[in-house]
Amino acid sequence: MIPHSESFISTCFDYIIVGGGTAGLALATRLSEDPSVSVGVIEAGDWHPNLDRINLPGLCGSLVGDVQYDWAFTSVPQSNLNNRQIDQPRGKGLGGSSMMNLLALTRAAACEYDALEVLGNPGWNWHEILEYMKKSESTVSPPQGHTMEYSLAPFDSRWHGESGPIAKSYPTYFNSLHKAFVATLEHLGVPRNPDPASVITIHQLYYVLTSISATAELFGQRVLRALIVFKSGGTPLVATGVEFIKCETTYMATCRREVVLSAGSFQTPKLLELSGLGNKEVLSQHGIDTLLHLPGVGENLPSAEDHLFVTTIHEIDAKYNTLDVVEGPETLPDSEPKAYLASPPTALFGFLPAQAFMEDEQRNEWKALATATAQNAPPGLKKQVKLQIEWFEDHSVAEGEVIPFPGFFRLSGLKPEPNKRYSSMVATSMHPLSRGSTHIASPDPTAPPRIDPSEIMHHIRYLAQTVTAAAEYLSNPADLPVLAAVLKFVLKAYRTEPLEEAVRKQVAPSIEESASDEALAEYVKNTCASSYHPLGTAAMLPFEDGGVVGPDLRIHGTANLRVADASILPMQLSAHTQATVYAIAEKAAGIIKSAM
């Protein structure tokens, strides 16, 4: 239930969770399974239980940019992207970004999860996280007709959950070009993965639906801002509750045991800094007293890894069924509405190893640049770069992603011609080397954070305590060639049978924009955008490696303040982040329960 503020503050909770998003609600639900435990959730947005734009999968993503549901953050101007500002949407409401995303539950390769343990976090590895992913989900088998027609693998209980609160399934809507995409990628040397939820994720025809789960035992409070309050004196710091503002009135919510931050990769570091935890130089700039010097707060934002994508659009033969005919559900053919609205439009994902889209010479050049990057990096970042170099040579790790969309991709900013049919494909790079930061821009808690997807040198700056100019997205010279190579692979796919048969005209990039490598690079700079997967800003690493939390998710230097959201992940994954965030929440619940 969601009580009035007076009722909320009169309760001394066992746990207070700041952020009612993907991780926060999942964690609160698990903790409140014990009827003797009280859990308070503080969230800035509203609850929207009956909104079609949230509940209908076919309308997924339609909330992006709507400030009623989206924080609508933007980056600072990016000089390497011709001074463009990059949108950074984040969900504002119960459910967080899971209420506005594109519903994908994908997993990275096993070695990427094992890297968490390699970087200093015992108990965080593929096998452990797999069990928590399975615990969060309940798998729904596809109709037999779809299984046979699209060669969908039967679900294997080794990899898929059977009794969790998040329902997942294959899509119900398959575009008429899906088979052509699969055959084309196979012709280009990308094998089909029979079960992309298992250890290896290279090429997957796999897209799943999710649902938000909550429980009536939760206490929730909608607020304008929140600050963590600590017991005076002594070390480590002890959190006693959360101060929040609602309707211009300040309230104090107290807790007996712990405070957990689940506000996301932009808001969690903002809350820490406003509460006096962070780099003392950053805090002093805004007149905030430093309670705990934590230079890693807000840093390690994998900038281009966020992930940057670029779009291609082709006009295709009008005989193919696409979503271009859809202006609204009422315009769909009688046989289409249920299938379309019950399923996201992007049903096919292709995850590509570097060998699939880069020649040996290109990969060797990338490796040389990455090796040079690591030479002057601080110890923590050097360890990460070393792993990225290993992954780049590993056929089981994706370095590029392609997502076909059955229609004109309107987020491109272009406009389709009337009565035409289109096929779009998004090209994304998975593990670029750039790093950045997000910090408070003002001591005003209602002000948005300053998001600067800066280069690797920014990370070096705060660790070495030197002054170094920070650059932006794609500033690391190794990053742009990878994204451009994925884009070239996509253009090649549209010139390869059987997909080529459907193509009538290349729309974006235009023929001129793709006439040379230099022209394609400029197209990337002018059009690339974020896939909305920020992480790493409260990294789970040893303090000396720039970490903010330890493997128990407790913030270094505190007794009872933890973080459970995507900000703890120190390195980007070759996957959409939702499934991993649910696993983080599940594991966090297990850690906290074991400490009771």
Image (spheres, grey):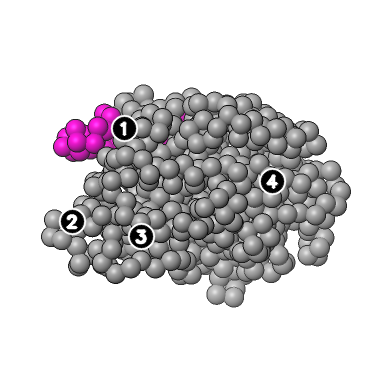
Q: Secondary structure at mark 4?
A: loop
Cβ atoms under marks 1 and 2 closer than 8 Å: no
Q: Position of residue 341 (x, y in %)?
A: 25, 56
Provide the residue span drawn in magenta.
130-154
Write down the residue under mark 4: 476
Q: Position of residue 141 (x, y in %)?
A: 24, 35
Disc 4 marks a residue whose amino acid type is: Asn
Whether residue 132 is in magenta: the answer is yes
C-alpha distance separating marks 1 and 2: 30 Å
Camera-near label (4 vs 2) is 4
Residue 408: mark in rendering: 3
Write down the residue under mark 1: 162
Whether residue 106 is in magenta: the answer is no
Say which label, 1 or 4, has the lower sequence index.
Answer: 1
Q: Look at the picture and state if 62 lies above or below 263.
A: below
Write down the residue under mark 2: 336
Camera-near label (2 vs 3) is 3
As rendered, which of 218 and 143 lies closer to the eye? Answer: 143
Q: Look at the picture and state if 322 lies above or below 222.
A: above
C-alpha distance separating marks 4 and 3: 32 Å
Disc 3 marks a residue whose amino acid type is: Phe
Q: Secondary structure at mark 2?
A: loop
